[in-house]
Amino acid sequence: MKQEIKAYDNVLGLIGNTPLIKINKITEELRGNFYAKVEAFNPGHSTKDRIALYIIEEAERQGILKPGDTIIETTSGNTGFSLAMVSIIKGYECILAVSSKSSADKIDMLRSMGAKVYVCPAHVSADDERSYYNVAKRLHEETKGSVYINQYFNDLNIEAHYKTTGPEIWEQTSGKITHLIACTGTGGTLSGAAKYLKEQNPNIRILGVDAFGSVIKKYHETKEFDNDEIYPYRIEGLGKNLIPTATDFDIIDKFVKVTDEESAHMTRNIAKTEGLFVGYTSGAVMQAILQYAEEGEFDENSNVIAIFPDHGSRYMSKVFSDEWMNAQGFFDSINLEEAQKIEY
Ligand code: PMP
């Protein structure tokens, strides 16, 4: 009898179908059942694998992309890594315009995945010709056979989650989900998954998480863009200083804002109590669950699904570094000495 070799054709076969994992200890005192959809189980270790694959394959279906063509995006984060990964397998060139604020580790990671990285000055405004927005736009105009992913303003971002994340959650919960909660950056994950889930059951509550320093929550409440809401903060991938069209504001019931400090401690707690090594925005969404619970959002019958967007390894020099935590003022110095003391 012929022996079958059980293997994926390539790494892209592993994208999606991420597990739900019950959160046990952190939510012990809360009413309801809490589960994380752990997107770190994607091969590129984040939820952005889904949109990278979907947007590129959609461009192929429409005949826009041919072998040897070029993928362009402005990102140093998860989306860049996922686009680089998909490009390698499918034979495209991947060009990423990143801000000089990006850590050397992140830039090296993108280059390791074969991407061509343009480092653009961080201190210039978005409309400056040297900004990474304008560099990407110019590269797209100058490069024949190129696709500009433009994730904040691309409807296919929402569609990717409508077609994958939403149905997976519906199936995994046998339709028993009562609340979906996620951090919004582009807003694609929450908006797309929510659209599918609300079509199945319009009573499901859709809860957003925003950062202090971002305009999203205020815009949701007032439909006004308030410049005073904008100031620097540390969590990456959460919140924004512009209004993305990839966020469907009407489908989201409510937002809360979380702080850098509480989200950072929560990220570390998730590792220490649940054994899940996940990123800063997973801590942010967990922190938001505590805040929503305080507001009386959940009861004994609630089945709450939280999106954990990426893996902890991307934050070794940030939330998982005692020195970084201390430098932000998130520890007192006595704690730092205690934390690092090893006694024999
Ligand atoms: N967390 C992290 C770490 C991210 O990189 C992003 C994407 N910017 C998000 C959360 C938010 O996901 P979305 O863009 O789909 O709203």
Image (cartoon, rainbow, N blue to C red):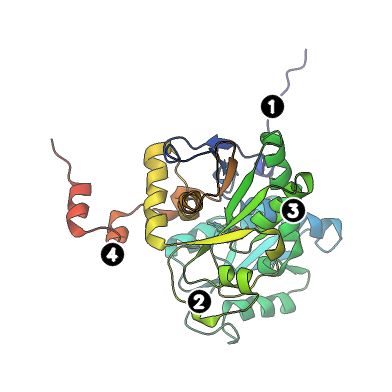
Q: CA distance from mark 2 to mark 1?
A: 52 Å
- In the figure, is residue 76 to the left or right of 202? left
Query: Where residue 139 sits in the image (x, y, percent)?
Result: 68, 76
Residue 6 tag number:
1
Q: Earlier in the sequence, mark 2 or mark 1?
A: 1
Q: Earlier in the sequence, mark 4 or mark 2?
A: 2
Helix, strand, or loop for circle 1? loop
Q: How many marks?
A: 4
Q: Earlier in the sequence, mark 2 or mark 3?
A: 3
Residue 166 tag number:
none
Indicate whether 99 appears above or below 61: below
Query: Where residue 342 sits in the image (x, y, percent)?
Result: 17, 41
The residue wearing badge 2 is 229
The residue wearing badge 3 is 195
Query: Where residue 94 sits in the image (x, y, percent)?
Result: 65, 63
Name, please, the residue furthest toward the top.
1
Q: Are marks 4 and 1 in contact (CB under 8 Å)?
A: no
Q: CA distance from mark 4 to mark 2?
A: 24 Å
